[in-house]
Structures are given as C-alpha cells and as structure tokens.
Amino acid sequence: MRKRILLTFMLFAVGLLAACFRQTFERGEIDLNSGLQISQSSENGIETGEDKMQIQIQDNAHTVVFLLNNSVAAGSLYKQLPLKIMVENYGNNEKIFYPPTKLNTSNTPSAEGPAGTLAYFEPWGNVVMYYGSFGRYRGLYDLGIAVSGGEHIKELTGEISVTKVSD
C-alpha cells in the first residue's frame, strides 16, 4: 500500500515538473542545448536583455514609446515596421490601428491590465493602445507596455508613424 501511495505521489510530482518545464520552454526561457536560461524576461513578459524591441508611435504632436514583450505576436508586429497608418478611436479607453498583415499569436500571453498596455485583438486584426485599464477578453493578446509618453495615447489622431527604436 505504501509503495502505491509513493508511486502515485512520484508520478504526480513528475507530471507537475513536466508541465512547468513545458510552460517555461514555450516562453523561450530554456535553451535545450545548454539547459541555461537565455531570456531575461520579467514576470510580465517584458524583455530586459540585449534583444529588447522598442517601438515609437508618433502623430504630429505626440510620441509614445512601447517596450515589446518577447512574444511571437510582438515579433510579428516588429517585423512589419516601419508603418504609416491611420489611428482610430474605439470605446472609451483605447486607440487602434490595423497592421498590413495579421500577427502570429502562437505562444503569446493574453492581455489584461493597466493603461499603457499595447495589445493585439486577433478576431479583428487590430493593434490596441490602451489609455484606460481593461479586463481580459478572448482573443486579446499582450504585446508590451508604454515606457514613455503613455499619457499621450488618448490624444493620438490621424496618420501615425510606427517605427523601431534603435539603441
């Protein structure tokens, strides 16, 4: 009887460790060749290492800089830059624009959170810049957070330029 309980416990522990490893691997934090951590992501998925991706969104009067997370969708947006595109009002807490090509959302975390969040709404194919807080919504994926000028998101109008920020 003790052996059966011990075996059950061991199988549960192995399963739990495997699930944790899988989540860590899918987020790109494990290099299977070396076993070392290669990502220096913080808890919210924002890249803090050498490979950080920053974008600047600018209209005629305002500039907002976003630090992208290390998700597949953020990389998919980054590869499409630079863009000149129209920004639109939507709801009472967000501005949106439509990138030319839909983003790949595989292994991208869901978005939920504070003002200043950059997200992607997959069902409509639009990028969302939140100037108010928001809740989780099916099909909404986290791309990053404003690190400068977030207070100007609400005022963005007309044609905007979306460009990579070089170090």
Image (cartoon, helix red, strand yellow):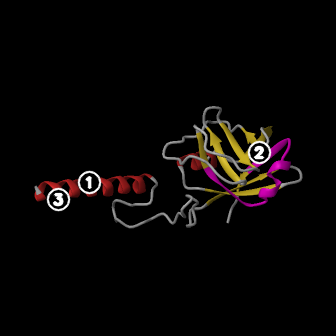
What whole-number distance in Å separates the C-alpha atoms at marks 3 and 1? 10 Å
What amino acid is labelled 1 in the image?
Phe
| Residue at the spot of label 2 | 93
What whole-number distance in Å separates the C-alpha atoms at marks 3 and 2? 53 Å
Which portion, as a residue range, is magenta?
A: 143-162
| Residue at the spot of label 1 | 12
Image quadrant where residue 85 sits: top right
Q: Secondary structure at mark 1?
A: helix
Disc 2 crowd rating (10 Å Cα; few below 14, some 14-19, many 20+) is: some
What whole-number distance in Å separates the C-alpha atoms at marks 2 and 1? 44 Å
Residue found at x 40% / y 55%: 25
| Residue at the spot of label 3 | 6
What amino acid is labelled 3 in the image?
Leu
Image quadrant where residue 68 sits: bottom right
Q: Nearer the viewer, residue 148 or 161?
A: 148
Q: Residue furthest right?
A: 61
Q: Position of residue 113 (x, y in %)?
A: 65, 52
Q: Nearer the viewer, residue 60 or 127?
A: 127
Q: Which mark is residue 24?
A: none
| In the rendered image, the vertical position of residue 140 relative to residue 150, given as above or below | above
Q: Position of residue 35 (x, y in %)?
A: 34, 65
Assess whether mark 2 and mark 3 are in contact (beta carbons under 8 angstroms).
Answer: no
